[in-house]
Image (cartoon, rainbow, N blue to C red):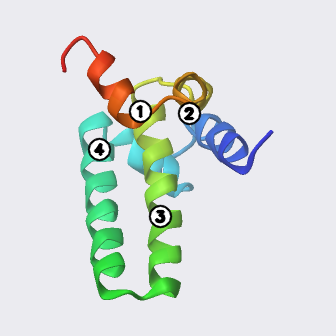
Amino acid sequence: MSILEDLAATIDARKGADPSSSWTAKLLAKGPEKCAEKFGEEAIEAIIEAVKGDREKLTSEGADVLYHFLVMLAARDVAIQDVLAELAQRQGISGIAEKAARPDA
């Protein structure tokens, strides 16, 4: 199991926790829209650090982005294994070819 899968399992376990005892439970209690908003905020912070070129801060913000992405997935009951399986299907395929093959492309 990967660190992302371990973290996703921890997040899933917090779904029913008391929001006053868990940051994850607090986020999930606010609903999927708030989880998505928080993910967006963290992504913007990571972008800012990437533009600045601060590797240490980008590393920290990157961890925040991954955590909040997993919370957002959990809020919509999307398993990390499904996302990883999608990535596995795309492995070895040119990004240009993969995008062109999409029905909405």
Dot 3 crowding, Cα within 10 Å, few <14, some 14–19, many 20+? some
Residue 83: x percent and y percent? 52, 29
Q: Which residue is mark 4?
A: 36
Which quadrant of the view contains residue 61?
A: bottom left
Residue 74: x percent and y percent? 48, 33
Q: Which residue is mark 3?
A: 64
* Mark 3 or 2, closer to the camera: 3
Q: Which residue is mark 2?
A: 16
Which quadrant of the view contains residue 42?
A: bottom left
- The mark nearer the N terminus, 1 or 3, is 3
Which quadrant of the view contains residue 80?
A: top right
Residue type marked 2? Gly
Residue type marked 1? Ala
* Mark 1 or 2, closer to the camera: 1
Q: Secondary structure at mark 4?
A: helix
Q: CA distance from mark 1 to mark 3?
A: 16 Å
